[in-house]
Amino acid sequence: MLLHKAVEDADIGEQIKLFTTDPAALRDVPKFCRFLGFHLASQINRGDHTEFVIRIDA
């Protein structure tokens, strides 16, 4: 829900960084990006959390 609000408020060309400890995010965030047409620029496992960078292209 918070990610959806963040992408709604973002402008084209912006990047959103998401930090999460939720293991379901490894599946859900890429699907979210594909479904809504956003670009998942990176997904990095930092040990205690995962960092996603989502670029708003459309």
Image (cartoon, rainbow, N blue to C red):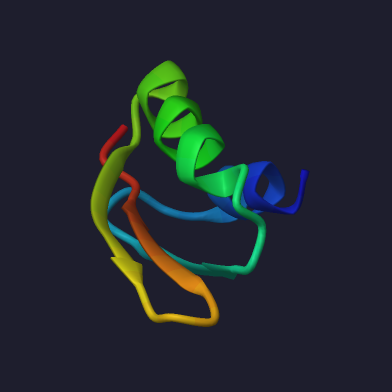
To which quarter of the image does residue 14 belong? bottom left
Looking at the image, residue 53 lies above or below residue 3: below
In the rendered view, does 11 fall on the left or right side of 24?
Answer: left
| 57 vs 12: above or below | above
Q: Nearer the viewer, residue 23 or 5?
A: 23
Q: Which quadrant holds the N terminus?
A: top right
Q: Residue at x 64, y 50 (%)?
A: 3
Q: Is residue 11 left or right of residue 12?
A: right
- Nearer the observer, 41 or 49: 49
Q: Quadrant of residue 33?
A: top left
In the image as oriented, which residue stretches furthest toward the front?
47
Residue drawn at 34 percent across, 35 percent down: 38
Residue 20 in the image, given as x and y percentages of width and height: 60, 67
Q: Residue furthest top?
A: 35
Residue 9, compared with residue 8, is above or below; it is below
Using the image as rendered, state which of residue 30 and residue 17 is in the foreground.
Answer: 30
Q: Is residue 14 left or right of residue 16?
A: left
Q: Quadrant of the C terminus?
A: top left
Q: Give the residue displayed 70% in from the left and 48% down from the top.
A: 5
The picture places residue 43, in percent across and down from the top left corner, at 30, 59
Whether residue 46 is situated above or below residue 14 in the rendered picture: below
